[in-house]
Amino acid sequence: LAEIKTLKAKQAFSDRDQSHNGKYEIPTFQQVIDLAKAESARLGRTIGIYPETKHPTYHAALGLAFEDKLLDMLKAAGWTDKAAPVFIQSFETANLKYLRPKTQIRLIQLVDGDGVDNDGKVSLAAPYDRPYDFAVLGDARTFQDMLSPAGLKEIATYADGVGPWKPYLIGTKPELGADGKPRDLNGDGVIDERDRAAIAPTNVVKDAHAAGLAVHTWTFRSEPKRLASTYKGDPAAEYKAFFALGIDGLFSDFPEQAVKARDAR
């Protein structure tokens, strides 16, 4: 821990404000809990936490399984049931299934992908094609399979919600040139989201709700190059499109804009 505390946080995106680099240490989980409680008391409203259990199969193989310790820390904070301001999320399935009989805290099955094809569909390639515990066991099912009606019903047996990467809900696709390659629509010499348009929404939200699951999608970013041309550089337009699907929550790098868009519905 002492060694970790020598590290300082740094902005991961070079095109964003770098002025806070090196100012803040990496907090412990207990410090995050304490901060959430302190700010809840100061502001007079509930501030929750949303811990992700990172690489549980890998850590278990090292003899460092952390699920029980996680629950112990949450219990010490007084958080043990569905009313707790906590969601526990994981890209793997086995640890969520392990947690389910041990806690009433809400569990979220994350769903990843590798990229988005030229037809707007999520592409799958290792290691982003399936939960790692599936890969270890030789289970051929993919993240895409998990979002089928049958897959969602299975998730509902051990989780309270699903957290799909947002292209699973609304994909984007480019306009292709005669050479079959995406066209640079704005002529800036770079192919990015501004050169792609949103396609029709999928049925994932509808199917998840039918299975009794909440839907929390991720990650929203406000820079023009990270917004499909459909939204004309306006983050609020993208939020509006996803809120219209009936999502129950989202992750954003710009939460103030997300809240503003939510409240403007």
Image (cartoon, grey):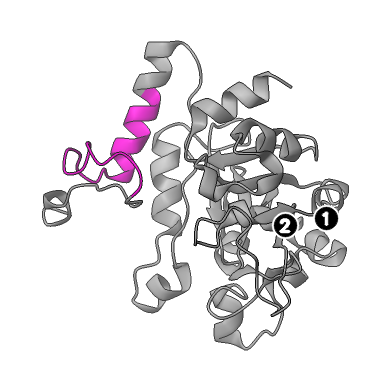
* Residue under the point 54% across and 28% down: 257
What is the three-letter code of the residue carrying label 2? Gly
Vertical placement of residue 171 versus 123, above or below: above
Find out whether residue 34 is within the magenta segment.
Answer: yes
* Residue under the point 33% across and 44% down: 29
- At which x and y percent is residue 142? 69, 76
SS class of the residue under badge 1? Answer: loop
Do the numbered discs 2 and 1 sit on residues whose CB atoms are within 8 Å? yes
In the depicted view, which residue is nearer to us: 177 or 203? 177
Determine crowd level at label 2: few under 14, some 14-19, many 20+ residues with C-alpha closer than 10 A.
many
Question: Which residues are the magenta region?
Answer: 15-37
What is the three-letter code of the residue carrying label 1? Thr
Give me the disc on residue 162.
none
Find out whether residue 254 is within the magenta segment.
Answer: no
Give the residue number, with chain letter if any, for mark 2: 171
In the depicted view, which residue is nearer to us: 218 or 70? 218
Vertical placement of residue 194 versus 147, above or below: above
Q: Quadrant of the N terminus?
A: bottom left
- At which x and y percent is residue 162? 68, 52
Give the residue number, with chain letter if any, for mark 1: 202
Could you tell whether 39 is left or right of 119 in the image? left
Mark sitting earlier along the chain (2/1): 2
Could you tell whether 6 is left or right of 139 in the image? left
Vertical placement of residue 227 versus 189, above or below: above
Could you tell whether 75 is left or right of 146 in the image? left
The answer for how far apart the CA atoms under marks 2 and 1 are is 8 Å
In the depicted view, which residue is nearer to us: 265 or 117? 117
* Residue under the point 40% across and 79% down: 61
- At which x and y percent is residue 243? 74, 35
